[in-house]
Image: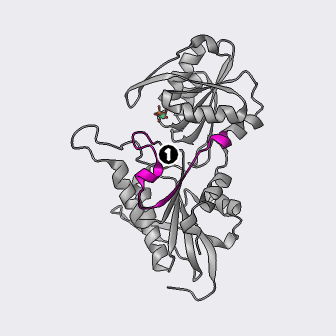
């Protein structure tokens, strides 16, 4: 154990790509600024990475590493090293706040020989962390986060109230129709709609390839003359939103906008959205992106407070 002062509250640690979110989380948690510690990384010419997380002699019982796992592969090894650096400095309990959690979709071997990535990721994180907080992870056949991480305390947050607040602040008109892309999205789009006092419907979506998405509306008549807001958990290639926008506009929608929890798409996809008639795309800030319009920090702080074991003295 390094350091000799009193054991402070919780250390909050962020990387260069997550420092802003980590800082916002410190503020939402009500922590002192000096409890924020930056994780330094250095890529060697051979692509190995050196991770340094210096607590500057401060002693902490608990620490939080804040980092979304979009573009996950190098981020994963870096958070594992950062966790080890915290343990070496005497930290007993470490929580990972990863608003976007990677590798949740491959929850089974679809073809023989495929690795079940979700399981592998769970084993890695359970070996390094005592708690995990995430927002709207893309779960499917394994429906609950605690089933994915049976050996770790988890908190699975929904950003529906945050998106609903965003829509309320924008004063969207009362006849606005929220559209979720597929039957599975009903929980999310339904929750946003009921919190925002709007109505919601889902489309029928078929994905035949990474970039091949077809969408059908069960009741196109509902769309005539109404503003439509597409609601999704993740925007990756953007093809889902584009297919939904085409279907809604073809059915006579007055306008199409979109909001999502996690925006992963590259800048050039913005033009494809405009070309498809999507006026605006807004996202939560768990993944840093030009579409970020609303902060997840207060929600993440409530998630952190809810981890009973992590917070136990
Ligand atoms: C899929 O089920 C998700 O809810 C999203 O609709 C999907 O991940 C979006 O991906 P993309 O932007 O590549 O169509």
Q: Residue 66 lies in what quarter of the image?
A: bottom right
Relative to 165, does residue 77 appear above or below in the rendering? Answer: below
Q: Position of residue 97 (x, y in %)?
A: 54, 58
Q: Report which quarter residue 232 is drawn in.
A: top right
Which residue does the numbered mark 1 point to in the structure image? 137
Q: Does the image show residue 43?
A: no
Q: Which residue lies at the image location 67% right of the left edge and 58% below the top edge?
A: 24
Residue 71, compared with residue 6, is above or below; it is: above
- The answer to whether 176 is drawn above or below residue 63 in the figure is above
Which of the two residues, 177 or 194, is positioned nearer the viewer here? Answer: 194
Residue 202 picture location, percent across and down = 55, 24
Which residue is depicted at the point 55% across and 67% down?
Answer: 310
Residue at the farthest bottom position: 4
Q: Position of residue 256 (x, y in %)?
A: 64, 23
- Where 287 falls versus 247 (above or below)? below
Q: Is residue 300 visible?
A: yes
Tally of numbered discs: 1
* Residue in view at x 65 percent, y 56 percent: 302
Left or right of 127 in this view: 169: right
In screen coordinates, is 251 left or right of 130? right
Label 1: how many Cα within 10 Å (few below 14, some 14–19, many 20+): many
Colouring convention used in this rendered image of the protein: one colour
**Which residues, given as a range, are shown in magenta?**
139-163
Tell me which residue sits at (70%, 36%) in the image: 195
């Amino acid at each position: 154990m390094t350091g000799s002062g009193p054991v402070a509250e919780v250390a909050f640690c962020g990387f260069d790509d997550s420092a802003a979110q980590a800082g916002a989380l410190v503020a939402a948690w009500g922590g002192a600024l000096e409890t924020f510690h930056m994780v330094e990384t250095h890529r060697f010419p051979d692509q190995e990475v050196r991770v340094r997380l210096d607590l500057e002699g401060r002693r902490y019982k608990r620490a939080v590493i804040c980092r979304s796992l979009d573009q996950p592969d190098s981020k994963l090894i870096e958070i594992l090293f950062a966790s080890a650096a915290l343990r070496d400095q005497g930290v007993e309990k470490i929580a990972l706040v990863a608003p976007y959690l990677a590798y949740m979709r491959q929850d089974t071997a679809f073809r023989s020989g495929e690795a079940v990535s979700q399981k592998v990721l769970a084993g890695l994180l359970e070996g390094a962390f005592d708690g995990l907080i995430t927002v709207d992870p893309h779960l499917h056949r394994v429906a609950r986060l605690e089933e994915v991480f049976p050996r770790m305390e988890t908190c699975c947050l929904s950003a529906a109230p945050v998106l609903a607040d965003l829509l309320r602040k924008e004063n969207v008109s009362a006849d606005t129709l929220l559209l979720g892309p597929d039957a599975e999205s009903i929980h999310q789009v339904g929750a946003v709609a009921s919190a925002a006092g709007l109505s919601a419907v889902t489309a029928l979506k078929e994905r035949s390839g990474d970039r091949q998405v077809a969408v059908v509306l069960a009741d196109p008549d509902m769309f005539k003359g109404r503003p439509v807001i597409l609601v999704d958990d993740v925007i990756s290639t953007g093809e889902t939103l584009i297919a939904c926008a085409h279907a809604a506009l073809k059915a006579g929608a007055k306008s199409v906008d979109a909001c999502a929890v996690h925006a992963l798409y590259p800048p050039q996809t913005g033009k494809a959205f405009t070309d498809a008639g999507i006026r605006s795309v807004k996202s939560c800030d768990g993944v840093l992106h030009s579409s970020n319009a609303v902060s997840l920090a207060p929600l993440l702080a409530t998630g952190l407070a809810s981890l009973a074991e992590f917070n136990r003295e």
